[in-house]
Amino acid sequence: MVPISGAPAPQQLGENPRGGAGQSGSTFPVRQHFVPKLLLKGFCDDEGRLWMGRKKPEAVFWQRPGKAFVQNHIYTRHGYEGAPPSAEHEHALSRIESDAAPVIDRIVNSARCIEHTELSQSECVFLQRFILAVARRTPESQRRVCNPATDDDIYRICRDRADEVGYEGLPDQDVFFAGDGVREIVERILHNVHAGFAAGVGPLTAEAEEKFIAETGVRFAVIARPDKNFVIGSHGITICDLNLVGRYLAGTVLPLAQDVLVHVTPWPSNTGLLVLGGNQESSDLVDAINKATSTQSNTIAGPSETLIRSLRV
């Protein structure tokens, strides 16, 4: 069996290529990580490189973590009617990362010593918010949980809003979308919705976050063998099927480093450390998690070219 130790044992975008200014006047980068850089450093090889494997277009290559899993202005909030872009969503995500970073470091360091990490209530909340932010912020995860907005959906929202404010000049749908600049404005709105969702902006998102914090718990797993590593993927979190990983790590996991992951459980008060040692069951479990990460992600990254190539065959 796999050993388990319980607690406590065991402007318009593109006009400024060097960055932009938010409404508060602070600067922000054009290229923004959708998989947090604070995680990527834990998946590098001894030379500080990430080995990456991509499905479309197919490729295996190495990359520095500062240039991996980035997209231009993915969280920048577009302005309207001449208003400048804002970094508010990027800053919100940065605060979540800053809160979680020391907690993640302590978890990883303790797990590598085969020691369970006792988290305070605030530390647990920081970690849960970080996990939820990772689940919300990647484009692939967003596509999994969000239905794409159609022209019918968008027009219906505009029509309902026009009715609400008593506006009677809204044209028919075809004429509406044929108007100058309408498509650009719609794309800008949808971008802001996705960026706001990633940052946890809005009362519905905040309510869902509080529910998640109240109803879930976390436990950890560590690989205690030199021949196995976890990978991380562009989907962010990894969803593990009970039939593939058994009861140990079924559900949502997030690799925190190449040898440590966090498992989201439905038991708020129960924690523990799962030690993946030298037996075949542990080996198979690591392989199953990596396979799930690879299946759910267009791009994966880890410390070994051989491992990445084996998952992209």
Image: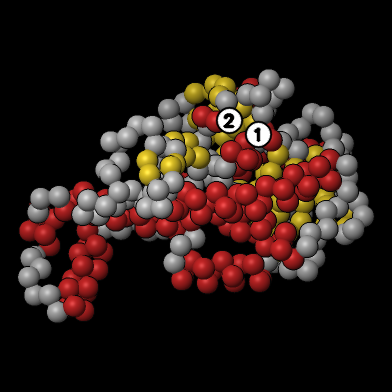
Q: Which mark is residue 228?
A: none
Disc 1 element: helix
Disc 2 element: helix
Cβ atoms under marks 1 and 2 closer than 8 Å:
yes
Check the picture and name the quadrant holding the C terminus. top right
Return the disc, 1 or 2, that comes first in the chain's sequence.
Answer: 1
Rendering coords of residue 163 (x, y %): 17, 78
Q: Badge 2: how crowded within 10 Å, few (<14), some, or many (20+)?
A: many
Residue 71, placed above or below residue 154: above
Residue 272, placed above or below residue 156: above
Question: Which residue is rendered at x = 82% and y = 29% of the image?
Answer: 226
Q: In this view, which residue lies farthest toward the right? A: 9
| Residue kind at label 2, given as amino acid type | Pro
Question: Which residue is rendered at x = 66% and y = 71% of the image?
Answer: 215
Q: Which mark is residue 65?
A: 2
Task: Say which quarter of the image contains residue 20.
Answer: top left
For the question of whether residue 46 can be seen, the reply is yes
Question: Which residue is rendered at x = 80% and y = 65% of the image?
Answer: 270
| Residue kind at label 1, given as amino acid type | Lys
Rendering coords of residue 206 (x, y %): 51, 68
Horizontal side of 175 relative to 124 (left or right) equals left
Question: Which residue is rendered at x = 26% and y = 58% of the image?
Answer: 150
Residue topped by disc 1: 41
**Real-space Cα distance between discs 1 and 2?**
6 Å
Rendering coords of residue 129 (x, y %): 61, 59
